[in-house]
Amino acid sequence: MKIADLAGRRVAIWGFGTEGRATLSALKVRLPGQRVAVLNDQGLPAAVVDELRGDRQVELQLGSAALAALPTYQVIVKSPGVSPYAEPSGAALEMVREAGSVVTSATQLWFDENPEARTIAITGTKGKSTTAALTAHLLRAAGLRVAVGGNIGQAMINFVVSPPQPEPEIWVIELSSFQTADLLARPSIAVLLNLFPEHLDWHGTVTTYFRDKLRLLSRSLSGAKPGAVLVNAADPETARHAGGWAATMRFNDPASIHLAAGRIYKGRQPLIAVDRVPLLGAHNLSNLCAALSAVQLAGVDPKAVVKAVESFRALPHRLLVLGERDSLLWVDDSISTTPQSAQAAVEAFEGRPVTLLLGGFERGLDYAGLARFVVERPVERVITLPDNGPRIAEAVRRARGERPAPKLVEAADLRQAVALAGSSTAPGGVVLLSPAAPSFGRFRDYRERGDEFAKAAGFEA
């Protein structure tokens, strides 16, 4: 369904976050004069409500009235934040489909508008943004015109109204599980980095979450013109759930692009020494293997572009070294929202005393494995943050038993945690914000949390 197909129909945008706003802007440009409904079952800031109510092209419905009105619209552009599994949105979605309404998404609209575009779609629990940015960086080094969007940078719907000039030869698109859950598109190359339990408040179960991630691959392999599929041979859950699929290529496999003995290889051919890669952590070396593999699937020789890796810079809030202060290294990994990502962050500082800041929005994840890890590593000190800090602290106490490490402190907020870390971490140590939990409630997003950490540590964001 293209945007032109919406002309003269009753159209609603369900959910008014970043992507909902971008969708409204696109529809207003492409369908001038046509009324568009904005439906949000939660409240919106007063300034946003005033703006929408003052727009003659917009019909606004909020709260329960928004849900009740859904079946009266012929086409509904659902935002990623609206879960089909949670209530009351799940029941409302069922009602909408029974009424015969068409449900689509802003990302799907972009794919429908660009059916011939060459696309590399990247998903996975962690590493999506870094891998997408690395892939684009390497493709540009090969002289290709590349556009990047999706969950990184701009919403894809923005490119419908303002396409990049000159026209990109290839698109690198990061997709979250919220976006892949109902995506009908078939990317040219689909990449799955890893699978860990995440976003269970949205997906309901781990099984559903994994299925929604894997949907990107199954869609790519379907149809008369199947795309290429790239998966991580070293990730246990990926191997278990996608092991039987006819993947085009597997990275982290000795026969393909992988890490061994301090170098990244393509089969037996050395590509780059690890000490030339300006990224911290084994997980980022895995991301690089994925990016080089995606580049190869796109028709570019990895050896011809691998030197460009040396000029790549870490993205903000992703194991980003802020600098040294008071004989301590301060590191912002605010993007970390799972126990596995926090563990990977700690492993990047092997041999150095680490004070680890953990905690955030409660989402029901199991922290027992992370607790055992910080005891066995050992991490020097764990400082927990609200809201789920007490539950993480209890998991660490159980794992620690009678052992003295790690020392454990429960902080009232991020600023207190930074102050405690600065005054108690041994000289030469690392203060690492890798919360293993989302930022919701206390902060607008992980970016704001990371910026606040930097400011509290004396590094202006």
Image (spheres, grey):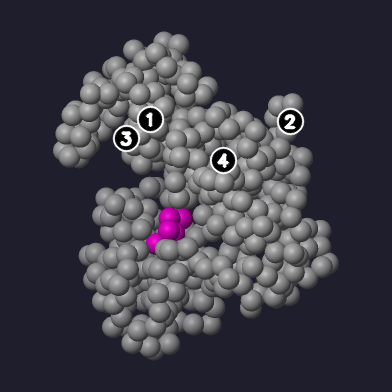
Pointer 2 or 4: first along the chain: 4
Quarter-of-image position of residue 143: bottom right
What residue is at 58 percent from the left and 43 percent from the top? 167
Q: Secondary structure at mark 1?
A: helix
Helix, strand or loop at mark 2: loop
Tell me the mark number nearer the camera, choosing from 2 and 1: 1
Among the two numbered marks 3 and 4 on one chain, the one whose residue lies closer to the N terminus = 3
**Residue 213 marker:** 4
Q: Secondary structure at mark 3?
A: loop
The verdict on residue 95 being magenta is no
Tell me whether the residue at label 3 lies in contact with that at label 1, contact meaning CB atoms closer than 8 angstroms: no
Residue depicted at 41% across the width and 27% down the height: 30
Is residue 19 something that shows in the picture?
A: yes
- Give the labeled residue for mark 2: 225
Q: Main secondary structure of the magenta part?
A: loop
Is 286 located above or below residue 102 in the figure? below
Task: Identify which amino acid the numbered label 4 is placed on.
Answer: Lys
Magenta stretch: give its range. Answer: 334-338
Q: Which residue is mark 1?
A: 29
Q: Is residue 336 magenta?
A: yes
Residue 406 visible, this orientation: no
